[in-house]
Structure formats: C-alpha cells, structure tokens
Image: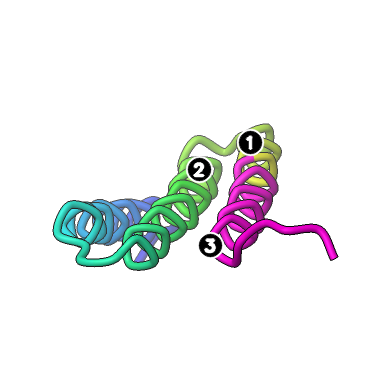
C-alpha cells in the first residue's frame, strides 16, 4: 500500500470520527460530554492536517497541526477550570 493510499484511508477514518463526534456534540447529554466531543474534534483536526501534510508532501502543514494542538490544549484547560468553578486559591 502506498503512502498516498494510507493518507486517504486516514482522511476517511477522520471523516467518520468527525461525524460520530458531531452526533455526541449535539446529543450531549451533559456539558462535559459536549466538551469531550469538542476536544476530540480538535484532535481530529490535528490528524487531518498531519495526513494532509503527508499527502501534499509539504511540511508547513505540520506547523499548522502543532498550532491547532496548542490552541486546543489551552481551550481544554480553560474549560476544565470553568467547570471546576474558576476560583483563585
């Protein structure tokens, strides 16, 4: 199997993951479930940009994937702090 075929399979699986994650995002039932679904969507975005970097043979997309991962991490930390109560100790 060539690297292009592997990349296309990875993109297809990422598309399926996005679909299932959007179902969880809409159905909930709790705010934490929705937050986990959003975190999963950001992880899939990192995977899609990495797969696209392999398919297009351009390393600049890996920088984009790193930036998305950092922003998603900061958003997850902020939302965890919000769910905890957000009080200074």
Q: CA distance from mark 2 to mark 1?
A: 7 Å
| Numbered range of the magenta stretch | 68-89
Q: CA distance from mark 2 to mark 3?
A: 29 Å
Q: Are marks 2 and 3 in contact (CB under 8 Å)?
A: no
- Residue, x 28% and y 66% (percent of image)? 30
Rendered image: mark on residue 83: 3
Q: Are marks 3 and 1 in contact (CB under 8 Å)?
A: no
Task: Indicate the position of residue 70 as horizontal and vertical percent values.
Answer: 69, 48
Check the picture and name the quadrant holding the N terminus. Answer: bottom left
Relative to 28, is 87 on the left or the right? right
Closer to the chain start, of discs 2 and 1, is: 2
Residue holding disc 2: 49
Overall secondary structure of the magenta section: helix
Closer to the chain start, of discs 3 and 1, is: 1
Q: Is residue 78 magenta?
A: yes
Quadrant of residue 23 in the image?
Answer: bottom left
Check the picture and name the quadrant holding the C terminus. Answer: bottom right
81 or 17, which is in the foreground? Answer: 81
- Residue, x 61% and y 36% (percent of image)? 61
Task: Indicate the position of residue 29 as horizontal and vertical percent values.
Answer: 20, 66
Task: Indicate the position of residue 21 as horizontal and vertical percent values.
Answer: 26, 59
Residue holding disc 1: 64
Task: Indicate the position of residue 78 as horizontal and vertical percent values.
Answer: 64, 52
Give the structural element (helix, strand or loop) at label 3. Answer: helix
76 or 20, which is in the foreground? Answer: 76
Q: CA distance from mark 3 to mark 1?
A: 28 Å
């Amino acid at each position: 199997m060539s690297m292009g075929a592997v990349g296309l399979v990875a993109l297809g699986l990422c598309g399926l993951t996005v679909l299932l994650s959007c179902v969880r995002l809409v159905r909930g039932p709790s705010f934490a479930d929705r937050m986990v679904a959003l975190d999963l969507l950001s992880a899939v975005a990192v995977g899609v940009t990495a797969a696209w970097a392999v398919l297009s043979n351009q390393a600049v997309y890996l920088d984009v994937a790193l930036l998305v991962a950092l922003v998603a991490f900061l958003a997850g930390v902020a939302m965890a702090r919000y769910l905890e109560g957000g009080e200074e100790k």
